[in-house]
Image: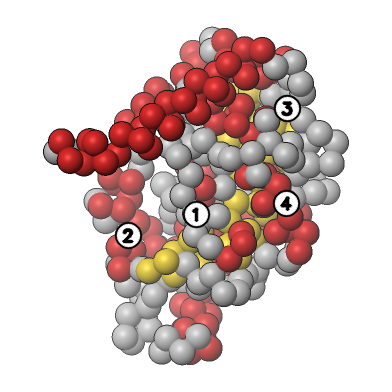
Amino acid sequence: MGVFDFVRNLPNKLYIALLIKKLEFHNRVSKKSMLSETGPTLSMTTYGVRFQTAHVSLEAIARGHVRPSRAVLFVDDEELYDQPTNGLKRLMKRGLEIQLVENFGPHTKYYPFLELVEDFDRPHATGDDDHIYPKWWLKGLSDSMQQRQDCLHAYRAHCIRLNQEGTEALPYLQWGPGITTAPSNLNFYTSSMGEIYNPDFLRTAKQRGRAFLDCCPKNDDLWLTSLAIENKVPIALVDGMNRTFPAIPASQQLTLEATNVFGGYNDVQIRDTFTDTILERLRELEQEQGLR
C-alpha cells in the first residue's frame, strides 16, 4: 500500500479502532443480558486467531436494538473451548452459549444449530465473527423477515449468471451485484454481512442434513442458496441495497476468500452443487428478468 492509499484509508482505520475500543469497554462494564424473549435465534462460529476477537462481533450484536432470544457460538477446537477469552466469559454471564462441535468448515456457523434444535418456532440469524455489525443489524433482518416471511433475507448478494447456452454458471468473479428491486432466486447471498432464515427453510435444511459435504464443503452460502432455489424461497436484500460492514483487522488473516474466490474453488463447488433442476430454474429466472 502506497502513502496516498494509507492516508486515504486512515479515517476509516481510526473509526474502526475507536469502535472496537468502545465495544471492548461496553463488554467490560455491561451487565445487561444479550438476550430478549422476542428476538430470533442466532449462531456464529469462530476459530484460530479470530477466537481472540470474536467477543467484539458478539458485543456489537448484544448492544443492538433487537437482541437474539438465544445466542450460540460454535467452536470446533477443544483447547479454545476450554479456555474462553475474558470477553467471551463476560458474554456468557449475559446469556451467550459456547458449544464444542464437529468441524463443518464454514457450515459450522449454522449447521450444528440445525442438529441441536428439534424444531424451529422462530427465524434464525447468522453472522460472522470478523465483522462489526451496527446496532440496527438484527432489527433490520427481523423487520425484513416480518415483511416477507417467505424469503431468505441478507445484507449482501451477487446475481448468479449463466453462460450463453445456459448450461452452467459463469465464473463467480464475473457475477454482478445482487438484484435489489425485488426478492429473487437469482440472488446468491454472501453470509459475511448477515442473513436470516424462516422456520420452514430451517426445517428444509435440517432434512437435507450433511449432504453439503459431498458438493460444497467449503461454501455454506452456495449450499443454502441452492436449497433456496430448489424450494423457490426468494432471496431479498434488506432495504433493497447491498451493504458492507466494517471488519475487525486482525481477524482477516484467516479467510476462505483466497481459496474459494481467487483460487477458483468456488467455481468447482458451484458446478458440483447446481443440479440440472437448479440450472433449469435459473434459466427461467434469467428469461423473466430479461437477462437471456
- In the rendered image, the quadrant that contains the C terminus is bottom left
Using the numbered discs, state the Cα–Cα distance from disc 1 to disc 3 in whole angstroms.
24 Å
Q: Residues within 10 Å of mark 3 (few under 14, many from 20)?
A: many
Q: Amino acid at mark 4?
A: Ser
Label ID, residue 51: none
> From the viewer's perspective, is the residue at label 2 or at label 4 nearer?
4
Q: Residues within 10 Å of mark 1 (few under 14, many from 20)?
A: some
Q: Nearer the viewer, residue 201 or 272?
A: 201
Q: Amino acid at mark 1?
A: Arg
Q: Position of residue 69 (x, y in %)?
A: 78, 36
Using the numbered discs, state the Cα–Cα distance from disc 4 to disc 1 in whole angstroms.
16 Å
> From the viewer's perspective, is the residue at label 2 or at label 3 nearer?
3
Residue receiving disc 1:
243
At horizontal 32% and vertical 80% (from top left) the residue drawn is 163
User: Mark 1 or mark 3: which comes first in sequence?
Assistant: 3
> From the viewer's perspective, is the residue at label 4 or at label 1 nearer?
1
Q: Amino acid at mark 3?
A: Met
Location of residue 93 (image quadrant): top right
Using the numbered discs, state the Cα–Cα distance from disc 2 to disc 4 in whole angstroms.
34 Å
User: Mark 2 or mark 4: which comes first in sequence?
Assistant: 4
Q: Position of residue 241 (x, y in %)?
A: 53, 63
Residue receiving disc 2:
268
**Is residue 45 something that shows in the picture?**
no
Question: Is residue 184 placed above or below 1 in the rendered structure?
Answer: below
User: Mark 2 or mark 1: which comes first in sequence?
Assistant: 1
Location of residue 98 (image quadrant): top right
Residue receiving disc 4:
142
- Do the residues bearing badges 4 and 1 touch, measured as CB atoms within 8 Å? no
Using the numbered discs, state the Cα–Cα distance from disc 3 to disc 4 in whole angstroms.
16 Å
Using the numbered discs, state the Cα–Cα distance from disc 2 to disc 3 in whole angstroms.
40 Å
